[in-house]
Image: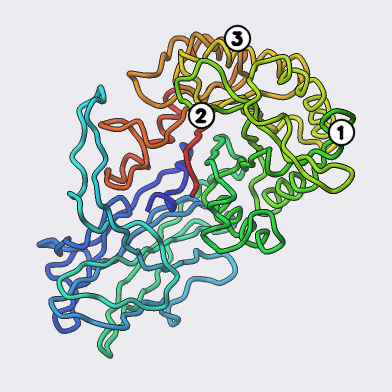
Amino acid sequence: MNCTCPLLALTALLVLAASSTSTPAAEGDLRVWTADSLLNMLPSAAAPAAPATSITVEAAANEIESAQVALRSPAAMSGVTARIAQDVAFPASSGPSIRLRWVGLVPLDVNTDDSGWPREPLAPIARAPTDLPDPLLDDASIDLPANTTRALWVDVNVPASTPAGTYRGRIEIRAGGRSIPVPIEVRVFGAQVPRERHLKVLQWMHANQLAGAFKVRAWSEQFWPVLEMAAANMAQHRQNIGFVEMDQVMILRGREDGEWTVDFALFDRAVETFMAQGVRDGIFAQSLAGRNEWTAPIFNARNFRIIRPDGSTGRFPPPNTRAPSEQFEAFCARFLPILEKHLTEKGWINIYLQSLADEPLAANAAAFRQIGEICRKYAPNIRRCDALRTDRPIDGALDVYVPILASGDTNLAFFDQKRQEGAEVWFYTCERPRGGHLNRLIDHPLIKVRLLHWMNWKLKMPGHLHWGYN
């Protein structure tokens, strides 16, 4: 359920409480109880001895808070539904709104390997093989297997215009022809979460995988509604920086051995799509170079599709062009000024972030630094940004440094120095760090997700990069 955790605002008090009664509500032997949003509601979960049967949410205006309703029965039940009771509805004009979604399960075959990490690992929430709760489903109903707990996710959205006060409503669980009430109380404070974002959130999103999931071709006309849907979902969860793979959305037109220019039509449409859906604080472009061998001392240039005057196509620079090299620099000497000019004309130069090559190591730091120098030489106004697995050897190559979030890998003193020199410093998570470190791994406790952005505040790092959105 990591996709639903809202960004914590330091100016608001964020509390979820639940009132308790002596026995859980029942429809026959159906057990229904409420739980905090930070609890992984496992299929094996049993009702507590003194379970809560109502929800109390405390929130500021312009905030989303969440809770859960759990269901369990010794006998299988089909067609279980949930709805908001209409007879005690919140004020339609300015009151909170509630969204209900069933929590789906995904299979886990192997647990996260926490061995070798410097902090003592936390025990996984369940041992594989198992099913874990994660996706939020808009399905109208669910079937409840015998002796299996399923959860209903409750999002309470408090608009900025909501007056302070207490609002009461009711959720109705319908099973076996009967309705089980779950009262909900929303206490809205006089504080308001500001609309302005103070944290930059970027999740890598590979277009081909997104397109494949919806059985369309990336960047075809059928793909754009999919991208709009994904961008709207990002904005809803306060992700504010879009991601593009530049060799897919920037097309060269001309001849490799002569004049060529850059067609930005796909790139512009992608950026405008992100912005229209609310992802408008930045755009991150991957990347000028990559590598086949992770520890290779030199990179390969990213090659772009080129459409020749006769309609034939190729890739340029040619595959396996080294980066850095004379041929790579010659390409950058033409490409980067064109890109910088276009970004300036579109008004995007201050929000654009250019990846040089992902996750440099000490083994290829010298090459990475040279690529950074080439980028700065030919596009001095474009900011360079990358996730890192090393620190001092890439000194000066970037404007935005993004070290992985792990005390064993992160030289905080070095990055403090970079910040004092005027650079920006974020942090980065992917399939690591593990162990006791904060991350979004599915078999780790949800509290880690909630604490991630408190770590941004503690470390004075105004951005978070995560791999990946899909």
User: At x 21% / y 32%, what residue is drawn?
Assistant: 121
Mark 3 is surrounded, within 10 Å at the Cα level, by few (under 14), some (14 to 19) or many (20 or more) other residues, namely: few
Q: Which residue is mark 2?
A: 292
Q: Which residue is mark 1?
A: 260
> Looking at numbered disc 1 in the image, what kind of residue is underneath it?
Trp
- Of all residues, the one furthest to the bottom in this rendering is 177
Foreground: disc 1 or disc 3: 1
- Of all residues, the one furthest to the left in this rendering is 49
Q: How many marks?
A: 3
User: 6 or 368, which is in the foreground?
Assistant: 368
Direction from residue 352 to residue 256 in the image, left or right:
right
Tell me where residue 396 appears, x and y as whole percent: 60, 10
Can residue 273 be spotted in the picture? yes
Distance, label 1 to label 3, CA atoms, is 38 Å
Q: Which residue is mark 3?
A: 421
Can residue 460 be spotted in the picture? no
Mark 1 is surrounded, within 10 Å at the Cα level, by few (under 14), some (14 to 19) or many (20 or more) other residues, namely: some
As drawn, 15 above or below 133:
above
> Looking at numbered disc 3 in the image, what kind of residue is underneath it?
Glu
Tell me where residue 301 appears, x and y as whole percent: 65, 26
> Looking at numbered disc 2 in the image, what kind of residue is underneath it?
Asn
Residue 87 occupies quadrant: bottom left
Mark toward the start of the polypeptide (1 vs 3)? 1
Q: Are marks 1 and 2 in contact (CB under 8 Å)?
A: no
User: 308 or 447, which is in the foreground?
Assistant: 308
Question: The residue tagged with tag 2: helix, strand or loop?
Answer: loop
User: 199 or 439, which is in the foreground?
Assistant: 439
Distance, label 3 to label 2, CA atoms, is 33 Å
As drawn, 36 above or below 12:
below
Mark 2 is surrounded, within 10 Å at the Cα level, by few (under 14), some (14 to 19) or many (20 or more) other residues, namely: few
Question: The residue tagged with tag 1: helix, strand or loop?
Answer: strand
User: At x 24% / y 61%, what residue is drawn?
Assistant: 19
